[in-house]
Image: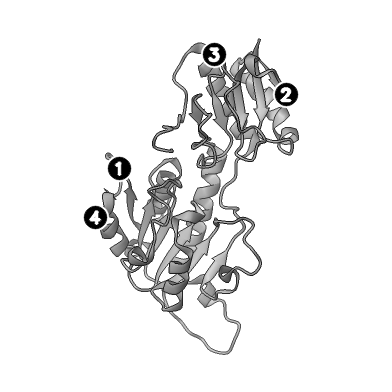
């Protein structure tokens, strides 16, 4: 019997045990699901970056490390990890991200904060139609593409950007440094959904924030390190950036005294844009285990050299 080690932390075990066993049965996966095992007997590991397991060297028979998170930056650089690593692409996570992004894009597009009247006056500022609002999505992976398509379906003028060229998309997409400058220059609302890598850390620095139209809005449910915090605060203070809605941060929970919490042009949400759902994620895990047992290509395998 194949041994599958649940190494995603004791706190998650009660949430995942029953859905995983059910998904294994539905997928026809024959495996002994355990929280402790002799490493030499383990054929696959279900993992989360906060796990106590940090040394993968003893797991000589392991053919899959299945991450429960979409992000892999906290594991991909582990020098002991030589086993195939797969990230989580959970339909529930994708749906949650699409709902968060479209909700906040609509909030800023329609000026909802401004139109809630708490003082005397009747300031009727009519927003443009969606087709007149330029929205750019940085990062065209599973989450970015899903969000871009949803925004396009709402009739926004959507464009995208990725580090490498993408073809066959239903909206304009650019890539590379020159492409980044082009898409930022046309972004009334910018959504950042890139992975965190050495190349994307502080991608939105002072210079690139100045490439945005004055008063642009940034929505970041991707990774906190994509934006230079000090540069963003300076751009907000001088009006170059009109508002920033931030769901992810370099330090989480965000410290109570962090300037983002009290800045009038910043909305802070507590990393709620998208989360892995045990029921749907368990089916993804089971499918990859089924593929592993049958020698088929694994889903969502990470390129360890590229970091995503």
Q: Is residue 136 above or below residue 287?
A: below
Measuring 55% from the left and 27% from the top, which residue is drawn there?
Answer: 65
1 lies left or right of 215: right
Q: Is residue 224 above or below residue 210?
A: above
Residue 193: where, in percent of width, then height?
44, 50
Residue 204: where, in percent of width, then height?
39, 60
Q: Nearer the viewer, residue 251 or 300?
A: 251
Mark in front: 4 vs 2: 2
Q: Is residue 151 above or below residue 306?
A: below
Give the class, few, some or many, for how many residues have Cα within 10 Å of label 4's Cα (few <14, many ≥20): few
Of the residues under marks 2 and 3, which one precedes in the sequence? 2
The residue tagged 4 is 178
Q: Nearer the viewer, residue 283 or 44?
A: 44
Of the residues under marks 3 and 1, which one precedes in the sequence? 1
The residue tagged 3 is 293
Cα separation, mark 4 vs mark 2, equals 50 Å
Q: Secondary structure at mark 1?
A: loop
Of the residues under marks 1 and 2, which one precedes in the sequence? 2
Q: Nearer the viewer, residue 38 or 223?
A: 38
Cα separation, mark 3 vs mark 1, equals 33 Å
Measuring 43% from the left and 32% from the top, which residue is drawn there?
Answer: 304
Measuring 47% from the left and 62% from the top, which residue is drawn there?
Answer: 106
The residue tagged 2 is 36
Q: Could you say which quadrant of the image residue 253 lies in?
A: bottom right
Figure quadrant of the N terminus: top right
Of the residues under marks 4 and 2, which one precedes in the sequence? 2
Residue 182 visible at all: yes
The residue tagged 1 is 164
Q: Secondary structure at mark 2?
A: loop
Measuring 61% from the left and 25% from the top, which residue is drawn there?
Answer: 45
90 lies left or right of 154: right
């Amino acid at each position: 019997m194949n041994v599958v080690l649940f190494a995603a932390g004791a706190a998650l075990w009660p949430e995942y045990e029953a859905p995983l066993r059910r998904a294994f049965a539905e997928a026809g996966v024959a495996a002994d699901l355990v929280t402790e095992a002799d490493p030499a007997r383990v054929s696959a590991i279900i993992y989360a970056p906060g796990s106590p397991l940090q040394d993968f060297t003893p797991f000589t028979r392991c053919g899959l490390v299945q991450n429960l998170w979409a992000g892999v930056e906290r594991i991909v650089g582990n020098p002991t990890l030589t086993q195939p690593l797969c990230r989580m692409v959970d339909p529930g996570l994708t749906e949650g991200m699409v709902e968060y992004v479209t909700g906040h894009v609509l909030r800023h597009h329609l000026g909802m904060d401004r139109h809630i009247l708490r003082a005397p006056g009747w300031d009727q500022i009519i927003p443009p139609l969606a087709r007149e609002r330029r929205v750019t999505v940085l990062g065209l992976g599973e989450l970015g593409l899903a969000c871009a398509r949803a925004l396009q379906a709402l009739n926004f003028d959507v464009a995208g950007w990725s580090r490498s060229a993408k073809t066959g998309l239903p909206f304009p997409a650019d890539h590379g440094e020159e492409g980044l400058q082009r898409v930022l220059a046309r972004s009334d609302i910018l959504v950042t959904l890139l992975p965190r890598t050495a190349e994307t850390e502080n991608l939105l620095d002072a210079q690139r924030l100045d490439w945005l139209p004055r008063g642009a809005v940034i929505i970041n449910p991707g990774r906190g390190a994509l934006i230079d915090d000090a540069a963003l605060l300076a751009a907000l203070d001088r009006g170059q950036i009109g508002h920033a809605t931030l769901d992810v941060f370099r330090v989480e929970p965000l410290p109570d005294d962090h300037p983002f919490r009290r800045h009038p042009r910043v909305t802070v949400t507590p990393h709620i844009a998208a989360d892995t759902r045990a029921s749907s994620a368990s089916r993804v895990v089971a499918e990859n285990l089924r593929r592993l047992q049958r020698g088929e290509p694994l889903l969502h395998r990470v390129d360890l050299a590229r970091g995503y």
